[in-house]
Image (cartoon, rainbow, N blue to C red):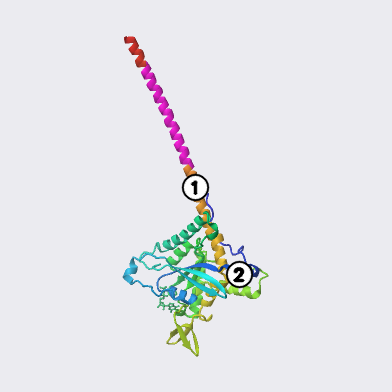
Amino acid sequence: MSSPIRFRSNKKGKSITFTYLYQVHRKTVKKGFTFTLMVAGETGLGKSTLINSLFLTDLYRDRKVPNAEERISQTVDIIKHTIGIEEKGIKLRLSIIDTPGFGDAVNNTASWKHVEDYIDQQFEQYFRDESGLNRKNIQDNRVHCLLYFISPFGHGLRPIDVECMKALHVKVNIIPLLAKADSLTQAEVHSKKLKMRDEIKQFGINIYQFPECDSDEDEDFQRQEQILKDSIPFAVIGSNIQVDSKGRRFRGRSYPWGVVEVENPVHSDFLMLRNMLVRTHMQDLKDVTREIHYENYRAQCIQSMTRMMVQERKRSNQSATDFLLLFFQLRKMQEVLERIQEQMQQSQRGTC
Ligand code: GDP
């Protein structure tokens, strides 16, 4: 009795219609959004810088970066930051789950195990709350999206990237990012993206799939959605500083040969990523988490609970059988004893 793991099929995927977005928008404007975003990838790939740039915060002020010796045997920590932001009048309570130490140790076989355990714990908590009495006020801490940082310096995905994404793709919406894209030429970004998309397909990794558009959808909207799909993995650049150049001030990185602008679509996919995360696809990421990933977890949970109950029933049936066997054995022994006693009494009577 095994339940097949469900993935979102792109063909059947629910399309985001304007009506749907409008309804969701109205409902959530009132309540405000909550969203949980996780980041993973080896130290130094620019995770903290990108998070600060995306949400214009300074979350990592007190961070202590461990030295190489400390990292040899480092285990993955899970750190949660919560910030409140407002996007076009909509309040958003954003939880960011950081995984320092990921991929840093000499032996990284279980690097993603902590991440996987964390995601499962949130599902477990939700499952318990949902079956409890106070179902209306459940706090949803399920992880809605994992930004997975891939190094720009390798030749495509590394074994740890493949293993990690394969271990997590049934539990969370993975969005792969090509980190530090300013260290690559435009042609390199293009060829690396193609290679990574091929590898993702070849290794059967199910990253987050953007929903299919309805055929009657606005042409411009359809084109934007196609651009999003073709941009995976998003090539990103982060910076914690403002740069002054040609009379303008912007978040960027300044080099002897020029300046890169974080929010310039020609330089990186940063804006595309930000827009999809906090504007266009946040609700869909939450829907897929609830309808696919959490449902998979719930189905597995119920299945293993049913299996345990069947085993327990079998075990109690077994102990009933054991009891009956013992009872009959005792009865038999009692009969034998009674017979011996009778024989002894008869022989005693004969001698008298
Ligand atoms: P983390 O360990 O993954 O959180 O990485 P950090 O955000 O601490 O960044 C590590 C180093 O990379 C710092 O010196 C950053 O200034 C630098 N860095 C961050 N983002 C970028 C980027 O997009 N491009 C380049 N070239 N360097 C970056």
Residue count near mark 1 (Cα–Cα under 10 Å), binned few <14, some 14–19, many ≥20: few
Kindly identify which residue carries mark 2.
Answer: 25
Residue 105's image quarter?
A: bottom left
Magenta region includes residue 324: yes
Within the displayed image, which quadrant is ligand 1 positioned in? bottom left
Q: Position of residue 266 (x, y in %)?
A: 53, 81
**78 displayed left or right of 282:** left
Kindly identify which residue carries mark 1.
Answer: 307
Mark 2: which secondary structure?
Answer: helix
Q: Main secondary structure of the magenta part?
A: helix
Q: Is residue 259 visible?
A: yes
What residue is shown at x 45% (from left), y 71% (from top)?
150
Distance from disc 2 to disc 1, alpha carbons, whole Å, reads: 42 Å
Task: Determine if the C-beta at disc 1 is less than 8 A from ligand 1.
Answer: no
Q: How many marks?
A: 2
Q: Position of residue 149 (x, y in %)?
A: 46, 71
Amino acid type of the residue that numbered disc 1 sits on in the rendered structure: Arg
In front of the other: 308 or 207: 308
* Above or below, comparing residue 25 to residue 117 in the picture: below
Q: Is residue 209 visible?
A: no
Mark 1: which secondary structure?
Answer: helix
Residue 163's image quarter?
A: bottom left
Residue count near mark 2 (Cα–Cα under 10 Å), binned few <14, some 14–19, many ≥20: some
Q: Which range of residues does the magenta coloring cover?
A: 313-342
Amino acid type of the residue that numbered disc 2 sits on in the rendered structure: His
Magenta region includes residue 66: no
What residue is shown at x 40% (from left), y 61% (from top)?
110
Q: Quadrant of the C terminus?
A: top left
Q: Position of residue 71 (x, y in %)?
A: 34, 68
What residue is shown at x 57% (from left), y 63% (from top)?
287
* Lower position in the chain sequence, tag 2 or tag 1: 2
**33 displayed left or right of 101:** right
